[in-house]
Amino acid sequence: MIGSCEAAYSCAYYNTISWRDETTPMPMENRPRVLFERLFGAAGTTDPRALAVLRNEDRSILDAINQDVSRLRGKLGGPDRGKIDQYLDAVRDAERRIQRAEAQSKDHVLPEMVGPKGTPSSWSEYYKLMTDLMVLAWQTDMTRVCTFQIGHEMSGRAYPEVGFGDSHHSVTHHQGDPVRIKKVIEINIFHTKLLSYYLEKLRATADGDGSLLDHSMIVYGGALSDGNLHLYTNLPTLLVAGGATGIKGGQHIRYRRGTPMNNLFLTMLDKANVPHVEQLGDSTGRLQLPSI
């Protein structure tokens, strides 16, 4: 997280692709059990009775914390109050999760799921478990946005499932070697097949008058177009958009070279009916997307 790692960009970009503001990265959680507990509490199950008991306990703890912090805040100077306010934001986030959980439990029957006991040793099983949790979070309306960093930048991870032990990062620096290029392609295909698992889970999960996939937008891609040369322009990006978005699928579109990625994200905010966003980072406008 410290220093500059790539073309004067902060090393923080290696560890998160989601940011609260221009300078504050959102903390990443890569432990399935902790992620489950963040969504549903430490009951270890989605059983409504167990969750109700836990939420009552959590609410009483949060009430006590709020009282203590309010008294402390009055005794501090400006800079220290700012730190306390950051802490209070985390407390309020916990309160909002409890409120969302209580609201959704009135309108939804929670799918039965036992909390993960640990992290699977197989990466493909880990991927599937994490995407199962994302589907569950969407299905129960615990969140409207999920971000999943599939491969950590500079990672030495290898994928024995594809039949060789070379790390992903090492084969991207192929220097034109056709054997290494073939291995990069095989890893990309492996990742894309796992993406199809996630999309099929969304398609198979009912949501309103359709499926979760019908009411979703998923962006899939990477930070480099050429790992060998570390090129981060002209990125190949996949947008999967359900019918409710009005975006026509099955299209391959080339935009003008140098078009900021944030133009796509700004357009997606419009499709998601997020109001009053005129600028997002270095965006220069909206993209023209094909309509149904």
Image: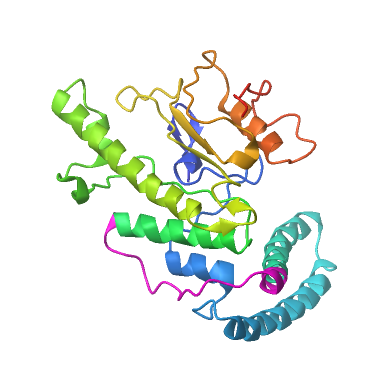
Coloration of the structure image: rainbow
| Residues in magenta, as a range | 101-123
Q: Residue at x 39, y 46 (%)?
A: 196
Q: Is residue 71 above or below residue 156?
A: below
Q: Is 5 left, or right, of 142 in this rendering?
A: left
Instruction: Tell me residue 123's x, y (percent).
Output: 30, 55
Q: Is 168 left, or right, of 276 in this rendering?
A: left
Which quadrant holds residue 275?
Answer: top right
Q: Residue at x 43, y 26 (%)?
A: 236
Which quadrant holds residue 263?
Answer: top right
Name the residue nearer the viewer: 178 or 290: 290
Q: Quadrant of the C terminus?
A: top right
Indicate yes or no whether the magenta region holds residue 211: no
Q: Residue at x 38, y 51 (%)?
A: 197
Indicate yes or no whether the magenta region holds residue 104: yes
Which residue reaches farthest top? 256
Name the residue nearer the viewer: 261 or 103: 103
Instruction: Tell me residue 217's x, y (percent).
Output: 57, 41
Instruction: Tell me residue 53's x, y (percent).
Output: 64, 86
Q: Is residue 264 above or below residue 147?
A: above
Q: Is residue 210 above or below residue 172?
A: below
Q: Residue at x 80, y 64 (%)?
A: 76
Which residue reaches farthest front? 209
Q: Main secondary structure of the magenta part?
A: loop
